[in-house]
Image: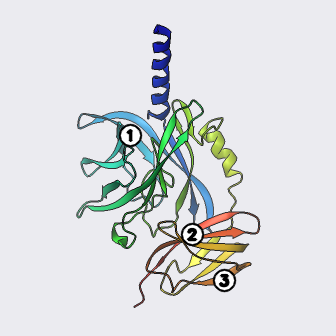
Amino acid sequence: MKNYFTAFCFLLVFSASAQSWSVGTSWYYQEDDPFPFWHPVVVNIQLTADTIIDGYPTFAVEGGCSCGLMEPQYLRRDGDQVFYYESGQFRLLYDFALGAGDTLHVEWGSNPVNYFVVMIDSVSYLYLPNGDSLKVQHIIPYDTNDLQHWAEWGDRIIEGIGGNYCLYPMWPTCDPQTYGLLCHETQAGVIYPIGATGTCMEIVDAEEAVLVQPEIMLMPSLTENYTRVKSSHLISRYWIFDAAGRKMGEGLPESAEFEVSVRALPPGVYFMQFSCFGGQKVQRKFIRIRSM
């Protein structure tokens, strides 16, 4: 019985350490750099020091995504909740305990304080090699018509890791767009990608070697009737999705430059996904505004 209890305690400690944060915990994301022309780069967020704020153990943090709504200097994790420090107070950033049908309300800014809301559409799990699991909250905008209170955060929140586009929510109409979690590493090693070997730096170095993607621009990205696509690669097919992930249209241009009519779409935020003849897939965002 004693041996069983010892083994059980070890599993609990290992499981907790795999998901806990400490100095050195890092996130790596891919984003597009528009200068001198669109090309992919890697950005890093890292916990750099321990400190105490308002009596709470807190981490100093450095780095961020280019279009983040906030770039806090301090983060605090308390069980299933993550808070960031802004305007002299801790504000909720994540609640990993939320389930399907729950909403997450995040405040940012000051004078006035703004906010946005996402809904947990469903929940799934990622299973680690040690048998532990990470809860995944699949999110959608709470109100796709309320662009004033909407932010870009990807389509899922991973327990202990955060949004799959960036740790921090981003302006929905901003470029460059951060759009991919490449690696997450804690003291216990690499947690994401699941089953990866090596360090995050090794994984990112290998990824950067194949990050050469087609350079695709949408002009304009804020439009009433149409947008023009200009690409460095021939595009074989494209799809249009709304903010909730529903397919709203598609086409087979077989060209590197063409126009797409969007006048039949309701006003809102949309994503155009392109498939190139080389097999690469690229996504761009645009907003259909109401006709005057």
Apparent side of residue 102 relative to residue 184 in the rendered image (left or right): left
Point 48% across, 86% down: residue: 224
Where is residue 28 drawn, in percent x and y? 55, 47
**Which structural element holds mark 3?**
strand
Instruction: Tell me: 164 left or right of 259.
Output: left
Q: Nearer the viewer, residue 188 or 53?
A: 188
Q: Which residue is mark 2?
A: 284
Q: Is residue 162 in view from this perspective?
A: no
Identify which amino acid the numbered label 2 is placed on: Arg
The quarter holding residue 129 reads top right
User: Can residue 154 be seen here?
Assistant: yes
Residue bearing mark 3: 258
What residue is rendered at 45% in x and 24% in y?
Answer: 12
Identify the residue under disc 1.
60
Compare marks 3 and 2 and give the one earlier in the sequence.
3
| Most distant residue in the right direction | 278
> Does the residue at mark 2 contact the one at mark 1 (Cβ under 8 Å)?
no
Amino acid identity at mark 1 = Ala
In front of the other: 61 or 16: 16
